[in-house]
């Protein structure tokens, strides 16, 4: 997801111990314990409203080097989240916006995050996210929802965090943009936490599945296709036991 190499991660990227969170007496996270090593793409799946976004916000609340500070003050009821040494986290929230009153152009907006980056570097990043030619001089206020998402991806690529946290990144994206994101994630050398309903993206990139169910997480260490096979096996065993 980045242009150039990211900083190497420690063997243990993040450790979660006893994480709990409730909303209006509804238990969303129930004593969650998890460990994630480097270079994993963890996909978080489950029913809508089941707590996936809550988990992401709980993970990043004290994340080092957090690029997007919007969830820095999110509170939990109990437990700890400890990030490994020299981790830096980039966050793509489900709800995002830019200053749509600004006449700042796309390339000017991106340049502010690394004043040393040259025009060639910036245009190369924009090109990877399908901004070509005159798109670079388009004003921020004129961007569509999909274009807004893509320029935020470019910011992550420029800043080179070694952990990426994505909450529904394919919302507002067309098929071509989703394919570009897919390719970028497959090339990424860090650790990714990904919430998405796009099963094709899951199938292509995920190396580990966290399945949410009533506050608990079933941690499946393997790709999405293997997870589905395992779920079918368990369903068949349960059906046989009821006979």
Image (spheres, helix red, strand yellow):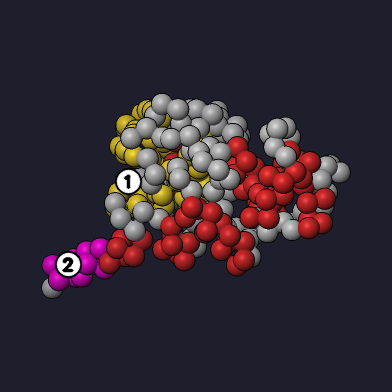
Q: Residue at position x 43%, y 35% from top?
A: 8
Instruction: For residue 186, say whether it is visible.
Output: yes
Q: Residue 157 in the image: x percent, y percent? A: 59, 44
Image quadrant assignment for residue 122:
top right
Q: Work out whether residue 101 or residue 214 is closer to the camera in this orientation and state it.
A: 101
The quadrant of the picture occupied by the C terminus is bottom left
Q: Which residue is mark 1?
A: 216
In the image, taking residue 234 as reference, residue 3 lies left or right, namely: right
Q: Residue at position x 50%, y 38% from top?
A: 6
Q: Residue at position x 74%, y 58% from top?
A: 132
Q: Which residue is mark 2?
A: 237
Is 51 placed above or below 239 here? above
What SS does tag 2 mark? helix
Circle 2 Cα neighbour tier, 10 Å, few/some/many (<14 / 14–19 / ≥20) = few
Q: Residue 93 in the image: x percent, y percent? A: 58, 44
What SS does tag 1 mark? strand
Task: Look at the image and give the residue range highlighted in magenta.
Answer: 230-241
């Amino acid at each position: 997801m980045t242009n150039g190499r990211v900083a190497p991660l420690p063997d243990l990227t993040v450790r979660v111990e006893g994480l709990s969170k409730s909303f209006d007496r509804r238990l969303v996270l129930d004593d969650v314990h998890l460990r994630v090593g480097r270079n994993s793409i963890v996909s978080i799946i489950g029913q809508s409203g089941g707590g996936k976004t809550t988990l992401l916000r709980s993970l990043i609340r004290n994340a080092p080097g957090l690029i997007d500070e919007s969830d820095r003050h999110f509170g939990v009821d109990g437990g700890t989240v400890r990030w490994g040494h020299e981790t830096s986290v980039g966050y793509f929230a489900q709800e995002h916006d830019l200053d749509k009153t600004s006449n700042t152009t796309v390339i000017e907006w991106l340049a502010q995050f690394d004043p040393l980056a040259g025009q060639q570097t910036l245009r190369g990043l924009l090109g990877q996210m399908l901004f070509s030619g005159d798109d670079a001089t388009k004003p921020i206020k004129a961007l569509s929802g999909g274009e807004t998402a893509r320029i935020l991806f470019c910011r992550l690529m420029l800043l080179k965090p070694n952990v990426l946290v994505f909450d529904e990144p394919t919302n507002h994206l067309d098929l071509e943009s989703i394919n570009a994101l897919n390719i970028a994630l497959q090339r990424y050398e860090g650790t990714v936490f990904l919430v998405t309903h796009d099963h094709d993206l899951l199938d292509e990139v995920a190396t580990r599945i966290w399945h949410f169910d009533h506050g608990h997480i079933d941690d499946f260490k393997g790709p999405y296709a293997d997870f589905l096979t395992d779920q079918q096996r368990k369903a068949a065993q349960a059906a046989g036991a009821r006979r």
